[in-house]
Amino acid sequence: MESTLVSQGYDLLLYGMGTVFAFLTLLVGITTLMSVVVNKLFVDVPEATPSAVLNASNGTAGAGSTVEPRILKVIQAAITQHRSKK
Amino acid sequence: MESTLVSQGYDLLLYGMGTVFAFLTLLVGITTLMSVVVNKLFVDVPEATPSAVLNASNGTAGAGSTVEPRILKVIQAAITQHRSKK
Amino acid sequence: MESTLVSQGYDLLLYGMGTVFAFLTLLVGITTLMSVVVNKLFVDVPEATPSAVLNASNGTAGAGSTVEPRILKVIQAAITQHRSKK
Amino acid sequence: MENLISLWASSGLAQMQSGQLIMMLVGLGLLFLAISKGFEPLLLVPIGFGTILANIPGAGFDAAPVYDALGHLESPGGLLYYIYHAGIETGLFPLVIFMGVGAMTDFGPLLANPKTLLLGAAAQVGIFTTILGAVALSHFGILDFSIREAASIGIIGGADGPTAIFVTSKLAPDLLGAIAVAAYSYMALVPIIQPPIMRALTTPAERQIRMEQLRPVTKAERIVFPLSLLVLVALLLPDAAPLLGMFCFGNLMRESGVVNRLSDTAQNALINIVTIFLGLGVGSKMSAEKFLNPETMGILALGAVAFCIGTASGVLMAKLMNSVSKHKVNPLIGAAGVSAVPMAARVANKVGLEANSQNFLLMHAMGPNVAGVIGSAVAAGVMINLVSGM
Amino acid sequence: MENLISLWASSGLAQMQSGQLIMMLVGLGLLFLAISKGFEPLLLVPIGFGTILANIPGAGFDAAPVYDALGHLESPGGLLYYIYHAGIETGLFPLVIFMGVGAMTDFGPLLANPKTLLLGAAAQVGIFTTILGAVALSHFGILDFSIREAASIGIIGGADGPTAIFVTSKLAPDLLGAIAVAAYSYMALVPIIQPPIMRALTTPAERQIRMEQLRPVTKAERIVFPLSLLVLVALLLPDAAPLLGMFCFGNLMRESGVVNRLSDTAQNALINIVTIFLGLGVGSKMSAEKFLNPETMGILALGAVAFCIGTASGVLMAKLMNSVSKHKVNPLIGAAGVSAVPMAARVANKVGLEANSQNFLLMHAMGPNVAGVIGSAVAAGVMINLVSGM
Amino acid sequence: MENLISLWASSGLAQMQSGQLIMMLVGLGLLFLAISKGFEPLLLVPIGFGTILANIPGAGFDAAPVYDALGHLESPGGLLYYIYHAGIETGLFPLVIFMGVGAMTDFGPLLANPKTLLLGAAAQVGIFTTILGAVALSHFGILDFSIREAASIGIIGGADGPTAIFVTSKLAPDLLGAIAVAAYSYMALVPIIQPPIMRALTTPAERQIRMEQLRPVTKAERIVFPLSLLVLVALLLPDAAPLLGMFCFGNLMRESGVVNRLSDTAQNALINIVTIFLGLGVGSKMSAEKFLNPETMGILALGAVAFCIGTASGVLMAKLMNSVSKHKVNPLIGAAGVSAVPMAARVANKVGLEANSQNFLLMHAMGPNVAGVIGSAVAAGVMINLVSGM
Ligand code: NA
Ligand code: NA
Ligand code: NA
């Protein structure tokens, strides 16, 4: 059945790659359409993309990003208090 | 058996509500008694209730409350050090 | 079979304690050898042992040790900024 | 060509049944409510998403594993199958969540004013009158509910998600999807459902009643309380012991102060992990045949009734207490007895501030609020016991 | 004396077979690569350690539990046995990891420039040509792979660990060790494998192409995108729904902003726990009879080919797109289409900076990079569907 | 009326047996020790609470699930049933805890002074002489212990909770409750048990011996040590490989520095989750018939003996080492060889400071302290091997 095996391989290449391209091409269209529709429906403040992406590319960002604002607030308070004591 | 179903419903109402009231009324008594006994046995510094409750009503409080004392201590140290350098 | 039970106990004491001593004595040798070999192969900056151990003896150190350097850095920055504003 | 046919035949479009499509829209609707309207998102996001996943034709999220004659796995089950059977059918997930809720609960206000426990008892009237309603609908042939189903519907009125899921998974697992959705949706709707009822049943003067400041509560009381509650449950109502036992365990970890590591994990990593899986698992019960039927409409209607009656009976109980006691309570805090922690307590505070902008009821409402959790867990225990014997 | 013999007979030295010894060295080698060379340590440390544990003669890490005739446990199974059967054979661990990866993924750059999805599609050519290679090796009698095995080998080219493990555990569990090791090793080698191919296929002028700054993406787009992708998968490709469904679920938790507790846990405690166990469980498949054979050499060679072809086809696709569109893309970002997030995107950035020190491609490369994750999950779905029917 | 009878009949009061009542008091006593006296609260709070839960009559925490003839679940099991069978009977929970303990352990002081390993070996004498004691009690007909039970009792002297639970769950699961309670209680009593023995066996001059400062240890040594230990275990003592393997894995994650995410999770969320469930599961074995009998008294007495002998033999070994070596060790640190990390090391430091207020032994005592963990894991492996063949 080796010939069958080879033909199975070709089938996988053909239908597999075909599906991948068809699906992602469709997704390009859907995504573009979705963005247009959504941005018409909701007027929304855009987020700053770069910092968000840097976050994503850094595995341990999750914990850090939840702690830092709190720390900054505490420090702000500490400094204000410190200054007022002088 | 529809009549049985209705009577089952009444039974649930009667015995269910009865048990709930009996149990919680008993708990009022037990709790009051417990507070008196416990506060006689242990003389203990009361905690400030309001802040504790605010904590409880805030889902993410858990993490925060473990971090803050440490942060405050570090800041205290940083400020002391900073002041001593002047 | 009580005599068997007692002899089983003696066997455990003999072979058990023997194995424990043999294994850990061997480990003393292996560890000493390993340290010599490893420290010849890799020239490496030694870590400060005491603080690391204090950490280990404190159950909650895990979280602490990941947070503190970040906090210290933030505080350093806050103090520098504060100083420069004067 | 065969492969193309196979691919098409296995596509969602070719296999989709109308029921599945509608259920996927229901799932999207739940996500909309959760994300855009803020309806209890911690549960409704996973439930909504789980609903969509469970209804994807051919994806097998809900498939059982297949074993061959020798017991070897031939094809593994789907994610939602494993979650449901390991965590929900066994009751483990609601119990672990109850432990975490216990570790987040502060009994201080309740300990400072224990008689507010009665408000938490009164609000459970909603549960039992709703059962009567479900039974009546069945009696008149309008809908068809067994007593087990009626009891599960009633527990929606407990306004406590894990309790509702625990009871329903034991008494009427087929209704799990509808009942969980109703319970969490109405909990989110508390700020809309409760205020009109509260205003209708109280006079402006009653709404302005100022309550005396709560006494401080000692650490020792806080530690002994969950143990007292546990012992009382053990002696009188063992059927409520799984829920209340884990609740007290969580609270003891919190208050004892000696196992903060464990308490933090119970309140954070552990409850979050279980919440994700509980929500997905509930979603797996949101199939068209179990959700798209007149009974679901009935469940939603009866659930709303349960919340209204619970609110009303809490308020009325507070007025009754005022008529016999000289320490007046503001009847608005009676509405917090339905639980829906901490939403109902905030609603009581808000309606109180409308009547008098200096009258802060939040702390006072936390007492009946957590009492309502105990009350509905007791009701759950009684119902499981009685219904199993019917 | 008998006891001494029993102790000696049960010692590792007396029972050790040469295969086990070699596999323990393989495990140490993986640990060396992970710790000293930084090869994907999050997975290779547990896999390497699991390899050593699984090959300790007589330690029983891999032993099945034994039950007596009445179903009582006579002797419990080993740790790795339970991990493998509960988490890997069922597919649960890769799915939970995919949820966590979804919660860590930022689709912003992809949404700003959706046509980079095509680069993520093109790079999957590596998967399918590698299948052809494996089939050819089998056809010419050099090695012996079934079509299920060939498909599992191909998925190495997806450059996505959990996807490779998910597919292999379904189609060819005996190859799990070799394929997981190959997948993670080559992902770590991306900075070495890709640049020469990228330079060979592009001119200096192409490498200096500046791309226009990405438009800002709104929160609403970010929320609707995972739902759109989910619906499309549900309608067209249910076989890819387990992987992509969990991926979209994690991403929706992240972007919705209303369940940050759950999203944080999915990105941290939960994914870390599962990663530890997934790695150990993969290690349990690293036995001498399954790993020390010519097929493993073939798998490693074919995996390298898959990465190279994937890289090349991503770059060539970008050049093709430039030839028909007026919005030029820098062809270097095509190489990021293999996924290996975020390593491949960083490589594109680095090679870009070599050509022009002011040309920052990182953000632009993140689009095809995450598109590659979607692409290989789609490929996985198609293959599982087609191969199961063959 | 029937319902009233049913409610009463199902109440705890009606069903309570005296044994259950006493066990609930035992549970409350454990909670008192844990919370008020600080006895190893991380384990004794869950064990104490689990004891109460398991003994609530009619609550079914310990009930097995019931399946119908077709294998469908008729009634789910109780929480403690699932915890015990999934996590303790299989040995999984102690192993995961050992991984976490490994990730928290610093081998630095041991690496700086490897001969302190011998102190960790000597202190295990307590384990084996206690076995002899248990066997003797059985021989003279005072109590009735099998060799499997005697071995489990001995392991209390290892002063290491997870090791004791692992061994006992394999050799004598019925004694699990008593042995776990004894092990953790005596670990908490180390500051009371050890000092008199330490003072009795040493002269003031010996207690004042100053040890040379520990040399700094390199990162490479720290990384290679757990691997060396693992290889040695694999070659010589595979029966100790489950415990020591996971211990080394945790330590390697810690020291490698490349998987801090995983190491943090192993030390925090994961070990906390497993500790909660391990404690509850041990509590499920605290039933009256298994705990309220003369054997438990014997176990408690023998456990105390084991701690005393272990302490003494650690101190005497240190004195023996001083008689043959010119690098003197302070014999107080020998007592830390029982493990009970880090309590025993602190006790050594405290007794040392009493003799000379400038003599800080903490760092020096950490070496034998962690050596004691290795020592008792080795002893556990030997015993499981030998006893299984007896
Ligand atoms: Na309630
Ligand atoms: Na990919
Ligand atoms: Na020990």
Image (tube, coloured by chain):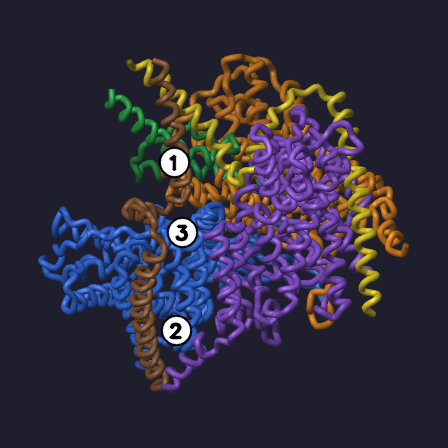
Chain colours: A yellow, B green, C brown, D orange, E purple, F blue
Specify whether residue B26 is in view.
Answer: yes
Establish whether ligand 3 lies closer than 8 Å to the Cβ of label 1.
no
Residue beneath the point at 16% across and 61% down: F328
Label 3 near label 2: C-beta < 8 Å? no
Chain of the residue where label 2 is placed in the rendered structure = F
Residue beneath the point at 46% across and 41% down: D264
Label 2 near label 1: C-beta < 8 Å? no
Amino acid marked by disc 1:
Pro
x and y percentages locating residue F305 in the rendered image: 27, 67
- Tell me the residue that label 2 is attached to: F382
Chain of the residue where label 1 is placed in the rendered structure = C
Amino acid marked by disc 3:
Glu
- Tell me the residue that label 3 is attached to: F255
How many other residues sit within 10 Å of disc 1, few (<14), some (14-19) or many (≥20)?
A: few
F125 and F317: which is toward the camera: F317
Asked if residue D212 lies left or right of residue E333, the reply is: left
CA–CA distance between discs 1 and 2? Answer: 43 Å
Chain of the residue where label 3 is placed in the rendered structure = F
Specify whether residue D231 is in view.
Answer: no
* Whether residue F227 is situated above or below residue D316 in the rendered picture: below
